[in-house]
Amino acid sequence: MQFFLNITLGGIATGMIVSAVALGLVLIFRATNVVNFAQGAMAMITTYVAYDVLRKGANYWLAFVVALAAGLVFGALTQVVLIRPVQGKSPLNAVIVTFGFLIFLEGVAGSIYGSTARNYPAPFSLSGQKIAGTQIAFSPFDVFVVVAVLVLMILMMVLFRGTDLGLRMRAVAFAPEAARLLGVRVRPLLTLGWGLAVAAGAMSALLVVPTSSLTPNFMDIILIYGFTAAVVGGLDSPVGALVGGLVTGLSLAYVGGYIGGSLEPMAALALVVVSLMIRPEGIFARPAARRV
Amino acid sequence: MGAFRRRVQTLTAKSWFRLPRQPMLRHLSFAVVAVVGLYFLTQWLSAFNDYEVGEIAFYVIALAGLTVLTGVNGQISLGHGGFMAVGAFTYALLVEHTTWSLVPELLVAVAVTAAAGLVIGIPATRLRGPYLAGMTLMVALGLPYLTNQYNSFFGGDQGLNTPAPNGPASVNPTEWLTWIQLAGAVIVLVLLGNLMRSRFGRSFRAVRDDEIAASLAGIHVARTKVIAFTVSAGCAGLAGAFLALSAGGVNSAEFPLALSIYILAGVVLGGTGSLMGVWWGAIIIVYLPTQWSQDLAKDFHANAVVSANLAVIIFGLVLVVTMLVAPGGIQGALRWVVGKGAAYFSSGRVSNMTLVLQESTDPPVSDGESVATITK
């Protein structure tokens, strides 16, 4: 029972991180119809930036803010330089561009930092707590993870539901042509959307890295979990990203805990297959109506 | 119609040499020429170069499979390295546990990989969009973990042994293996070439160009996509088995994500949609990471870390830059070239007419292409 509880708690913590990755993917897919396969690699780069800031003697929180800001700028630049030219072309082109960018970034990081694994500090203790006499595998850092992702989700919701800017961004994502005709400036908002999404990705990487280690490809596997969560929840639904992330995190935790940790990536693939078979549009997606 | 056609044929027969009109015959005659040429090539090259030619041959197979999927059918796979791993491990397990001969083992490896492709392809076709791309990426990234989980079955870090098959005593074993791989590449190219000229090939292209129009014309879009994906995965399986033979053993480290990227970049570089262009892509994949990028790194006095990553950086750049510089993307560039070619041939030449007539004598299957050719 205690084992089950510990796995569940671990699954929730993983699930929250996966939700943040999925949120980044969903924000970009909703607005630009592109799945950003470079999301993980871009977050890896921002984490190396934060690592350099830390090495210069800065404290954890300054590095945290720097990573998010770097993500915002990096995402916006990427949208302008790489994505805008392929926007509106065959979706294959965007897939190839983001995939090529993924491996390019990993190669660049590998050339600069080598492939040696580096440790990235955590702001809170990573060891489990004793509550009422039983050891619970839920560390203060896990609490921080859950809180941080929830704050991110709430901020995004406030932005999209509560502000004029968010309303315009939703309009751009929903019907770009109509939004343009109503006087919304579409292109800067798409750029901003990419910036926000990559900042979300940067945060997810900062939450992963203390329990993993910093290498050029440490985000690869997290990216495919995020993709799983986004597919389960529906590729165009931010709420779906949260729910899909939790479903994915818990499923992977149970597979890892009861069968074997190395099976988790294949379990994620199985989850995608099953979820596409049962509910192709995802749990929370808007109903699909394709225009002829 | 018949009389007109005969007249057209007599007109075109003026040229002193004509390729057979039957696609099968034409492709086979190409194959015979290729086999003779490649045989002399292996004779002329040293054993080490033969080994590299063998590598080129299996990359040709993998690239041809992905060309059918991406260039002809308009779907994409980011994980063909993963499917190569499926083929390689299947082959190695058959070597370990059975006493079959080479050909049935290879055929089973192809069948198993094609089945894996089917499992991925069916759910992915239920929706439009990047689902297939994501799922294939999961295959490429997840498979190495799977082999770690079942260490004893997949041979752990050492992997499984796949000794090269014994040829006649008079033939150098490396050369023998190279011949087998080249023969495999030629057979695959002939088969795919025929497939492209068949009803299936036309359906693939119709689905790529416009899914809605294709389905209105009676093509089962989902089934067509799944067939293309299955064929493509099967090719990757054969390529993987050949890779295992070249390497002499299989372990999961041979199938990093970079392999999938090389294959995709090879297709993009070699000219998507062209089955002969894959040779260029394969040559680049074999020589760029091992030799050209090392030479380049040496020229710039780069350190070992940079030179180890240079190939990956170059391939990544190739993918990004190709997509940005060729604005219409793969298909657009292809169509542009085809359009130029068609314009050239239609400038008062009769050969174009025979082409149209041949297309129109096909049984009235429901595909858009022959109609489109006539109305042009």
Image: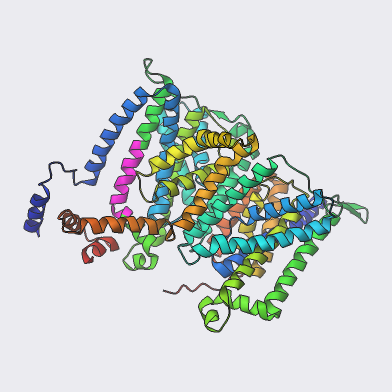
Q: Is residue B156 above or below residue B111?
A: above
Q: Which quadrant holds residue A90?
A: bottom left
The x and y percentages for residue B319 are: 50, 51
Horizontal side of residue B10 vs A1, given as left or right: left
Nearer to me, A147 or A38: A38
The x and y percentages for residue B317 are: 53, 49
The x and y percentages for residue A13 are: 76, 57
Secondary structure mainly formed by the magenta segment: helix
Residue B235 appears in the rendering: no
Q: Residue furthest right?
A: A133
Nearer to me, A36 or A3: A36
Q: Is residue A283 above or below residue A220?
A: below
**Which residue occupies 37% across, 44% down?**
B277
**Which residue occupies 25% across, 59% down?**
B343
Q: Which residues are magenta?
A: B186-201
Residue B341 appears in the rendering: yes
Horizontal side of residue A256 vs B37, given as left or right: right
